[in-house]
Image (cartoon, rainbow, N blue to C red):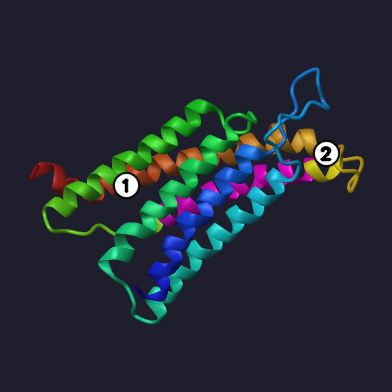
């Protein structure tokens, strides 16, 4: 297995670590700010941010290295976008309990990924491999920016709770105004890229 494919597989493992960190993050209960469940970690969001950034970096380097060294393979064409989808689906689902991403938004985005994956499986049954297109990559970048934005705010809240940072007066406006703006941009690009990808490969449906 070449280096780009190893990075793709590594992204799946890092995604698992990200999910574990987000699951163990200390989420305070309303009216009980000091309540902590038995299985929790006060730096879960910070660790989740680091794991997500690391996974995002592998997404850049696996494609860049494959193109620069002429290591593009059918495995990479298929698994690179799959690893992206697993990472992003995990991130959006993990942010729902924190009221960062509305559940319906996560459903729309993940449904889009299932639809495109189904199209790739249809192409594979006909002996074709459909790589990710540039618009799809731009969509992924916007989605990653949205997730990193919320994870950064959640990580900063952990630093404030630990007494490392103080007076984050801008935190709530950033959460309630900046977040929805990024979500809207990511959602629009997600739907637009899906329509473009389906139209570009419409011949597969005609031959189905």
| Residue plotted at (37% across, 35% down) | 111
Viewer-nearest residue: 153 or 90: 90
Using residue 33 as the reference point, say whether residue 84 is left or right of it.
left
Check residue 54 for magenta coloring. no
Task: Report the residue marked by disc 2.
Answer: 170
- Residue at the extreme left: 207
Q: Residue at left 68%, top 39%?
A: 25
Name the outermost residue toward the front.
Answer: 38
Where is residue 101, by image quadrant?
top right
Residue 146 falls in image quadrant: top right
Question: Which residue is more in the foreground, 30 or 107?
Answer: 30
Residue 196, label in figure:
1
Q: Is residue 42 visible?
A: yes
Say what secondary structure mark 1 lies in: helix
From the image, give the main secondary structure of the stretch colored magenta: helix
Magenta segment: 136-157
| Residue 30 left/right relative to 201 | right
């Amino acid at each position: 297995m070449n280096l780009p494919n190893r990075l793709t597989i590594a992204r799946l493992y890092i995604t698992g670590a990200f999910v574990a960190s987000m699951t163990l993050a200390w989420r305070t209960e309303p009216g009980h700010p000091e309540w902590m469940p038995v299985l929790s970690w006060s730096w879960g969001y910070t660790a989740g941010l680091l794991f997500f950034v690391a996974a995002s970096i592998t997404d850049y380097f696996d494609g860049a290295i494959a193109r620069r060294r002429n290591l593009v393979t059918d495995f990479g064409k298929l698994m690179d976008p799959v690893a992206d989808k697993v990472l992003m689906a995990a991130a959006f689902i993990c942010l729902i309990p924190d009221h960062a991403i509305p559940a319906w938004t996560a459903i729309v985005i993940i449904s889009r990924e299932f639809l495109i994956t189904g199209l790739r499986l249809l192409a594979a049954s006909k002996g074709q491999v459909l790589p990710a297109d540039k618009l799809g990559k731009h969509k992924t970048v916007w989605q990653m920016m949205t997730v990193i934005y919320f994870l950064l705010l959640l990580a900063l809240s952990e630093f404030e709770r630990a007494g490392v940072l103080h007076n984050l007066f801008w935190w709530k406006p950033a959460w309630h105004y900046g977040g929805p703006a990024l979500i809207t941009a990511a959602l629009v690009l997600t739907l637009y890229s899906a329509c473009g990808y389906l139209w570009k490969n419409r011949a597969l449906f005609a031959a189905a």
